[in-house]
Amino acid sequence: MLTLDSVWKSNSESPSEFILKDCSFSFQERRIYAIVGTSGVGKTTLLRALNNLVPIDRGRILLAEQDISALHPAEVRRRISLMFQTPAFVGDSVRENLDFAARFARRDKIEFSALMERVHLNPAFLNRDVTQLSVGQQQRVCLARTLATRPDILLLDEPTSALDDDTADGILTLVGEISKQEGLLTIFVTHRRSHARKLGEHVLELSDGQLRILS
């Protein structure tokens, strides 16, 4: 469903160094993949390339056999949703953030209250200022926002890195539940192998420009 085809991607800070080196891998639909790797190896850059937020140097990234570089950016954002490591918001209230995402949705009407319940948040939070929420609650809002477009693919950039163990465990469980219910291809990057093993049906390692299967 999402394929890296002989992809080369250079390091923006050191163009002579490559994060991806002739990397090929096919992510299958309705699966959960966890990608581990040391700090600075390029996990975030890989996700941004898969979402076409950063260009690759050579090769192709295919979404259902279509080169994502040939697709309209709005189409890519709708079908491949990226949740960043640090919560980032586009408005003051939770509702404003969901409204923004709803513009890209494939359905006419989105029930925000139901969406909040999906991520285990009280619908009353819709009118709350996002800065008044805990980091764990903010991550749930970000997850709700990514789901608002009804994507085919969910990319997660270390969403548990700033959370305590109990909160992180709750987020991982929630992501697993939603991925299964929605039939999503989910790709989750982390430096914590325990989190990779908990969430990932398949665990990969990004090392020396290649993705290698660990389990």
Image (tube, rainbow, N blue to C red):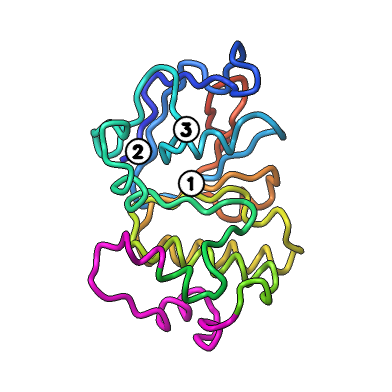
Q: Is residue 15 above or below residue 4?
A: above
The span from disc 2 to disc 3 (Cα, nearest Å) is 16 Å
Image quarter of the N terminus: top left
Residue located 53% across and 88% down the image:
124
Q: Position of residue 162 (x, y in %)?
A: 73, 57
What is the x, y in percent for residue 63? 30, 38
Mark 3, mark 1: which one is toward the viewer? 3
Element under disc 1? strand
Disc 1 vs disc 2: Cβ atoms closer than 8 Å? Answer: yes
Q: Residue 145 at what x, y percent from top left? A: 46, 65
The three-letter code of the residue at mark 1 reads Ile
Residue at the spot of label 3: 54
- In the picture, measured across the screen, residue 146 lies left or right of residue 131, that is left
Query: Which residue does the numbered mark 1 point to in the structure image?
Result: 187
Q: What amino acid is at disc 3? A: Val
Of 148 and 155, which appears nearest the observer?
A: 148
Residue 210: image quadrant is: top right
Three-letter amino acid code at the position of disc 2: Leu
Magenta residue span: 100-128
Look at the picture and state if 164 lies above or below 24.
below
